[in-house]
Image (cartoon, coloured by chain):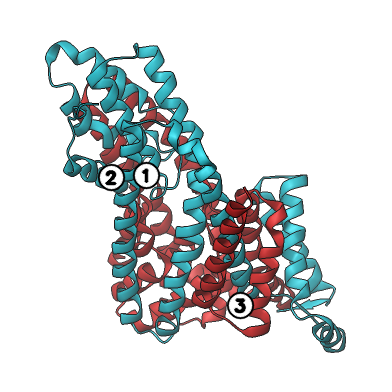
Chain colours: A red, B cyan
Amino acid sequence: MIQALLVALWHGFSKSAWGYATAYQYCGILASSWIYGIIYGNPTQGLIIGSAIQSIYMGLVAPGGNSPSDTGLATAIAVPIGLTTGLDVDTCLTLAVPVGLLGTVVQQLIYTIKGYNARMVDKCAAAGDTRGVTLWAFWLATVFTLLLYGPIVFVGVYFGTELVQKVLEFLPAWLTTGLSIAGGILPSLGFALTIKVIGKPTYIPFFIMGFYLTKFLGLGTMAVAVFAVCAALMIAFLSMENK
Amino acid sequence: MSEKKTILTQKDVIRFFLRWSLACETPHSYERMQAPALCFAFIPALKKMYPNPEDHQLLCDALTRQNQYFNTQGIWGASVLGIALGMEEEQAITRAMDPEQANAAINGVKTGFMGPMAGVGDTIDWATLMYIFVGIALPYTSEGNPFGLIFPVIVFAIVMHIEGIVMTTIGYKFGRESIAKLFEGGLVNLLISTSAIIGMMMMGSLASSYVSFRLRSETVQGVMDKILPGMLPLLIVFIVYIVMTRVTDKIGRIALGIIIVSLVLSILKIATA
């Protein structure tokens, strides 16, 4: 009970993302799963589940705050349930995927609700009420986020454990396999979205190059980054010389 | 030309960025996106620009101006904030523009730059830098070792703050001088295309590791691997991209479609996990 409450509090707080430059780290999948692990007295296993969740969401970028999947909610539900029921890591993942998708609906809800805060900031700004601006733009925005996400996570974690166990017993093999297949395909959503946001379809050969640098040569992110920066600089210098 | 009059110090500029960074995503809404956070960040600077009670209306105008629709990436986009800060200071000193002109000029620059800078920031910070750090952390965290987590978190936070402060300061100096300079020489375009190349390659590399799809039939899969390994996952990324650009941009719907297709492929025993 208290543990579910703590998880709900942490998730609600992490959703208000204080400190943009650091929030995605200290509230990210890895850090959060470690914290949930501490709450349930098993940080090691929490982090292991979190690492598995992180790896299915690799490459996920949230352009303009529109995430294709709510990784935070997926972590907040899947890690505690995985820890209390002792599910294996793979089963935790099949749990995380649908929760993450559900989370995007909640995200839409909170983004709509906070429009009210923006209008209140308008009112305070027009009156030169700087305290009011701080209250609505920062403090109350945090409170609203906490109030919306907290209960969802609490209910999910507190009642979810038993429910999930029962549901999992009844799940047929085709469904779990299907969800695993979806887990393999879903990351493509994030990559496609990033290609779209970058907005230069003519640069797709670079995408294929990065793809096969890793597929053929097995290079990691750091090594690919070195090649990418060099390729980008080469092209930049060449285009400058041609002017 | 004589030395320019200034109101803000470097300390004020840093404080401005830190306030922005603190609140940036907190009041995010569909209606205004990050605008209230920007308004919040501007409070001390604007108060310093308009200390006199008779300028109260100008302070109100400026605060209202900074609560208009705004959305960018918080670190590289901070250069846009810096520009806005510089322009506000210029306006506070010279009072060259009437309120309507100031609204149009300052918000015009903000909305013009927020998109491109967000694109640069998303690819460099979130698609490249962050995944380098996650890449360092994962091997350790997969074994449950928290030190693999703490070190990258701290280093990443330091890098991001330095980046953000530098961006804000550069933007601020541009804002005090002339926006036109940024457009001159195509520097902005060069930055955008360079970061686009880096982003594309990083995304390709990550897609290769994390998009997976296997046919159930080992023989067919084996033949495909011989021709060109990874061609199915690569194809999937492009199919999703085409659906996203040509059919629907509703990500939730595409995700649902992927799950339905996966279930069908599982029932028909075509694909396997």
Q: Position of residue B66 (x, y in %)?
A: 35, 28
Query: Which residue is the site of mark 3?
Result: A169
Q: Is residue B53 above or below residue B245?
A: above
At a point 35% along the width and 83% down the height, the residue shown is: A44
Q: Is residue B212 above or below residue A25?
A: below
Q: Disc 3 on helix, strand or loop?
A: helix
Question: Of label 2 and label 1, which has the lower sequence position?
Answer: 2
Distance CA(mark 2)–CA(mark 3):
51 Å
Is B64 or A171 nearer to us in this picture?
B64
Query: Within 10 Å of the Cα at label 3, are there few (<14), some (14-19), or many (20+) other Cα atoms?
Result: few
Query: Which residue is the site of mark 1?
Result: B78
Q: Amino acid at mark 3?
A: Glu
Residue A174 in the figure: left or right of residue B188: right
Query: Which residue is the site of mark 2?
Result: B17
At a point 23% along the width and 41% down the height, the residue shown is: B13
Say whether mark 1 and mark 2 are on the same chain. Answer: yes
- Residue B17 seen in render: yes
Distance CA(mark 2)–CA(mark 1):
7 Å
Is B130 or A241 nearer to us in this picture?
A241
> Which chain contains the residue that carries disc 2?
B
